[in-house]
Image: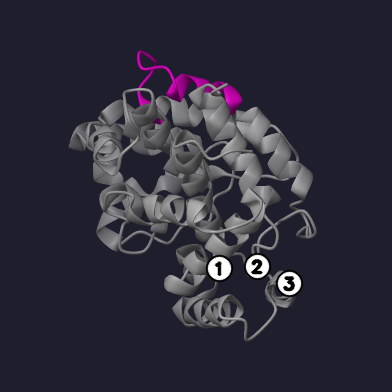
Amino acid sequence: MTRPVAQQAELALLLEVATTPTPGNVDRHRDHDTLRFEHFLAGAVGASEGLGDLADPDGPPIGVAFEHAVSGMSNQSGGNTQFGGLLLLAPLVRAAVLGDLTPERATAVAEGTGVEDAAGFYRAFEHVDVAVADPPEDMDALDVRRGRDAVPEIRDRNLSLFDVLARSADHDGIAREWTTGFERTFDAADRLPARDGPLLDRAADVFLDLLAADPDTFVAINHGQETANDIRERAEAARDGRIDPETLADELVAEGINPGTTADILAGGLFVALERGAEV
């Protein structure tokens, strides 16, 4: 029996955090000091109503549904668990209920966003603390950390959510997915069925593939580009068998380095794979 699209998205979030190891991230064996495995489970369940809105072809604009999902996600004591994952899933889920889930259809959904989508996106930042890069000096009025206070400026400039994310695509990996055809997300989905073993074991391998291929932008925002480059090289060593992925996972947690963007892209890839028939 095929699951409803919203359930597939919720399951993708659950599978991502259950994938072990995902070096630096919370997984079944590793918690962070204030962010634990249970918080991610609660966050995924809390996001379910917003995911249901996204999975309704006649539902609210996807930015408004995204805010609903983030609000529900925040209903746990850990804080931000899946903000980036939900932002990536938003156009994918809406695209999946409109027909076959393809990069072209997801891109059409993303490019079709409007001002109300952007307003919902900005309001979502009021529910949880999200690590973001400082905006350029000429874009202070559009700083996402202003939340709903930035919405009048969004309306004055008639900016869509796609427009807003395009301004961040050079330094934010999820924004880059939105504006470049969800390339890494669909690549992750393609890699999952090409591996052997249980889905979570395959997902752990794909996570290393992703982290070894590109420096994680969340790491770059929090620790600098040099550190992000170093983590990419260490992930490459783990992928190639030169170090143990479990050892790398323990090291990154101890160092407080969290490749969260890579985890978000894995969640998106898992959703696409589930929609294509991946079995659990």
Is residue 54 part of the magenta span, yes or no?
yes
Determine the image quadrant of residue 91: top left
Determine whether, in the image, residue 108 is placed left or right of residue 238.
left
Residue at horizontal 67%, vertical 30%?
Answer: 45
Q: Which residues are magenta?
A: 48-63
Is residue 55 part of the magenta span, yes or no?
yes
Q: 106 or 73: nearer the eye?
A: 106
State the residue position of label 2.
23
**Badge nearest the viewer, 2 or 1:** 1
Pinpoint residue 158: horizontal percent, then vertical percent: 19, 33
SS for dot 1 = helix
Q: Mark 1: which amino acid?
A: Leu
State the residue position of label 1.
208
Relative to 81, residue 74 above or below = above
Determine whether, in the image, residue 168 is placed left or right of residue 158.
right
Q: CA distance from mark 3 to mark 2?
A: 7 Å
Q: Which numbered disc, 1 or 3, marks the residue that appears first in the sequence?
A: 1
Q: CA distance from mark 1 to mark 3?
A: 11 Å
- What numbered label is drawn on residue 246? 3
Q: Which numbered disc, 3 or 2, marks the residue that appears first in the sequence?
A: 2
Q: 83 or 52: nearer the eye?
A: 52
Pinpoint residue 148: horizontal percent, then vertical percent: 42, 33
| Residue that extends furthest to the front in the rendered view of this protein | 196
Q: Which numbered disc, 2 or 1, marks the residue that appears first in the sequence?
A: 2
| Residue that extends furthest to the top in the rendered view of this protein | 58
Quadrant location, the C terminus: top right
